[in-house]
Structure formats: structure tokens, C-alpha cells
Image (cartoon, rainbow, N blue to C red):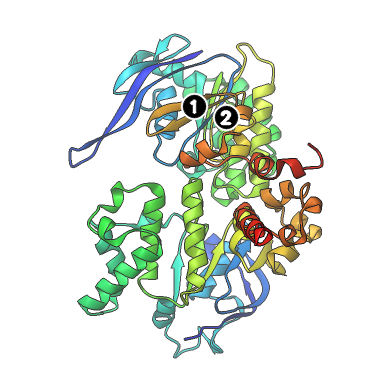
Amino acid sequence: MSLELSLERVSFHYTGIAASSASVLRDVTFTLAENECTAIVGPSGSGKTTLIQHFTGLLRPTRGRVLVDGADIHSKKYSLTALRRRIGLVFQFPEAQLFEETVYRDVAFGPTNLGLGAEEIDLRVRNALTLTGLEADAFAGRSPFRLSEGEKRKVAIAGVLAMQPEMIILDEPTAGLDPVGVQSISAILESLVSRGTTPVFITHHMDLVAEIAQRVLVLSAGSVIFDGTPEQLFQNNPVLEEAKLDLPNFIQEFAAYRPSLPPALQSVRSYRQLVHRLQQHLVSRRS
Amino acid sequence: MIAVNHISFDYISEQGSFRRVLADVSFEIADGDFIAIMGANGSGKSTLARCLNGLLLPSTGEVLVDGLNTRDAEQLRRIRRRVAMLFQNPDNQIVSATVEREIAFGLENLGVEYEEMHRRVEQMLRRFSLLPFRQKSPHYLSGGEKQRLALASVLAMEPDYLILDEPTSLLDPAGRREMVRLFREWHDQPATPRRTTVLITQFPEEALLADRLLILQRGRTVMDGPPETLLRRTEELAGLGLDSPVRFKLQQLLGPLNPAS
């Protein structure tokens, strides 16, 4: 399976009573590649959430086209329902939408609606829970309302993963979580790439971008002002300034140490990576 | 001064089972203190914050604000007037149709006179860079602007104590910097009694702003001391599900390599 999502000169503005100068997109063009963990960053009000609503046809561009595998998703015969099975969308604070009595039934909700057999549903629910780091047997029978904030969010993400989408779009998946919660969401996103689901996420958390993103799109006032790797972004001061972004905390603090480290350690982007490389480095020096 | 005396708090679920969220917590907040509170999700931070101004009453124990007991229903108005609270999500706090009405809302409730109300609203609009939005609906503000409005609205009531419950966790980096600047500025301004701040946060860098740090685990205070000292205990903190500043982690890992040290 492969999925190619392209935006072609997409502009968007609200009309009617909700009309306002905010939340517009201006001439946005890019293609999201398969298996490439992509972060979307930018100040609040820059159009990030509006942008991802175009990915599954929740919003329709005022101008321009959204193409999936070359087909315009707003053409007459195109099935948006089928598209939404291929691209999963996880809104901000998705745990607010949990409603079933057990974790199992909540995660099974999507696959059940697909009309799948009981066995297939069971398999998908278990896989999805495991992917999010929740042990299926331990959590299946529990009430989603009595879990911790981090666990609730994982259940909500598992509900989307159970649809086995080819791409999953997440709007600020770590907002409001504690460091343990942030770390586990980061691990989930990282593991998805190798399992055939491409993660695309909005975040304000620049250390998360540094740690797991392979590509970053920067939005400012509705335009994509940067499209490249995290390394390229962290060296691009004009873009960082225009979008009022900070360098990741780690990158800022690590600068003082970098020159005195061996080359193999100089390119790390996160504390976790540093620890990992340092271990490898010590092992290789010993052997 | 706020005295927290042996408070416990139990939540009772609809199914009738109960969960202890705070267990025998005691500490004092002196006038002029800047205290940070950290703890993993579910450690009881927000419950503790809500006990400080009587939004929640402890199951046992008591909270005294300048000697006024939060259990005393007749004193609650006075207590809430002194102890202001800012929440994580401004959408849960903002109620008015325009920005200036929002700032005036609390003042009307307090029965502040028209002239004085007008003066304070103008002052807040200016100090919090909200003048261009004064007639606008808060609905059209960005997340950072909304949180600024929420802070302006509680500070317009001229409290002595400010309780901030993860006030920056949903903001973008620029909004976060601005929010930190604004509550620091409020705290540092000379006043009688001296202004007192309690900041609940997940960000270790923000906890470093405080003079004192309390760390909660499963409803108990497990650490209490200067943030500069506590936040260097990186392994212990990790065990509590908490992060320490990257600066301290790097110092420990690479200390001898730092040219500056």
C-alpha cells in the first residue's frame, strides 16, 4: 500500500458569519511522503489545524486542490468516507471523545463500524492497544474514564490506529501531558513509521520535533515558510524568528559542549540520542 | 500567609469507590513566596491548587488564608478575592462577549465602583497589550492572547495570591515566554502585603523561577526545597516521572567536558 497526499496551491478562508482574517491558508503546496514522520509547527493562529482539516476533506479549499494518489478528493466520484479510513485524524484532546464503558469497546468502535468480523476486530483492537504501549489484557476491560490522562490519550489514539490507516494525523498529541506521557507518545509515533502508518503531527514542542521528526513544515500566517529537515530548520534563524519558534532546549544547552566532543557525538539532536550514542561510543572504544 | 494543615482529599466515583488524591499534605506559603509545584499527571497538583482558594474543600484537615478557614462559607468571598486562580485552558475561564467586558466581569461581581472599574480595565488592557482587541469577542483571540486575557482578568481584581495551574502548557513558545514574563512582573512589583505566587508546572525550566519547589507523588509531598538543588537530583526525579532541566542533565553526563565549568 502506498499513499501520496499532495496539496496544490491550496488557499482557504472562512466565509459567512465565521469570516475573519485569522485561520487562512495562502497558496500552500507540498506532498507528504510515505514513511516520513513529519512535524507541522508554527505560532498559534498560523493555520496548522485548518491545514490538517484539508487532509481528509473536512474543509474544502477556497482555491487549489487536495490530491490523494493523484485524484482530486473533492471531485464528484471521490469517496471521502473511503479516504477517512486511509487517513486517520486525531484531534486535540482526543480523550474528550471517549465514550464507551470499556477500553476494548472504545477501540473497537471504528472497526465495528467498518463491518468487520469479530475475529478481525479483536485482532485489530489488541494490535492497536499494543502499539500504543497499553497491555491489551490489562486494559481491555477497564473503564476509559478511570485511566490517567496519558493512558486516556493512548486509548483515543488506539481507536484511530484500529482502523489501520496508512497515515495518521495528530493535532498536538502531547499537549498537557507530563514528561512520561510525552515520552510514550513520542515512542508511539516513532514506532509507527516502521509499521506502515505514516505519522504527521502538529506540535509546539520543539524538542519532540528534534527527537523524532524527519521533516518539518513551518507555517506562518497561513503560508508554508519552510519545508526541510529539523537540522536545516535549527540553522535557519530568519525562519525561526518569523514563526517565533525556539530552538529545542537540548540544542541550546548542548551548543557549549559540542566543540569538545568527538565528531560521532556532535550531530545528536536530543538528550536520548546523546545517551544512546555515548553508549555506542564507549563500547566501540573498548573493543 | 496560606497555611495548609494536614489536608487529605478523597474523590468518590459514581460507582461508589473512592480514591485518595491528597494524603496528609502540610506546608505554609509565606507572603512574598514564589513556590513551584511539580508532580506527574494524577499526583494531586490541581486538586491541591483548588484547595488553596476554597474551590475544593479538603476531606480532612484545613486551609487557612490569612487566618480565614476555607471551610467557613461566610469567608469564601474574602478568600477568593485575595487568592486568584488561573487555569491551564483559558476556554474554561472566559465567559464574556468582549475582551473589555471580560476584564470588567470580576470587578462587577466584587462591586467595584464604576470609575475605579474603568481605570483598572484601561490599565489592564494596556499592560497586557490587549488594547487592539478591546471590543472583540475573546473567541477570535489566539491561545496565547486568550491566556493573557484570563490573567489580566484575575489580576484586575488585585489579589494578594496568584495560583497558576499549568498556565503555559497549551501555549506556543512565544505565548509561553510572554506569560512567564507577565506573571513574574506581577510578582516582583512592590505591594503590601508582598505578592505571592504558586506555580504548578510540568516544565522544570519554569520551576527554576521559583524560590521553593514542592514535589508531589500520589498525593504526598515527597520533596520540598530550593529548585536549584532538587532539580539536580535527575535520577530521583525520573523515578517520580518528572523531567529535570536539560542543562543539569548535560552537566551530569558531560560535566568535565564543558569549557565553561
The residue that mark 2 highlights is B230
Q: Chain of mark 2?
A: B
Q: Are marks 1 and 2 in contact (CB under 8 Å)?
A: yes
Left or right: A201 with respect to B27? right
The residue that mark 1 highlights is B223
Left or right: A81 with respect to B231? left
> Is B249 placed above or below B164 here?
below
For the residue labelled by badge 1, is the local secondary structure a helix, a strand or a loop?
A: strand
Left or right: A270 with respect to B60? right
The answer to whether residue A22 is visible is: no
| Residue B161: x %, y % from top left | 54, 21
Q: Nearer the viewer, residue B215 or B145?
A: B215
Q: Nearer the viewer, residue A24 or B131?
A: A24
Q: Nearer the viewer, residue A156 or A35?
A: A35
| Residue A208: x %, y % from top left | 59, 56
* Residues at marks 1 and 2, CA–CA distance in whole angstroms: 8 Å
Quarter holding residue A284: bottom right
Quarter holding residue B41: top left
Q: Tag 1: Cα neighbours inside 10 Å, few (<14), some, or many (≥20)?
A: some
Q: Tag 2: Cα neighbours inside 10 Å, few (<14), some, or many (≥20)?
A: some
For the residue labelled by badge 2, is the local secondary structure a helix, a strand or a loop?
A: helix
| Residue B143: x %, y % from top left | 58, 48
Q: Residue reaching furthest front?
A: A287
The residue shown at (65%, 26%) is: B186
The answer to whether residue B150 is visible is: yes
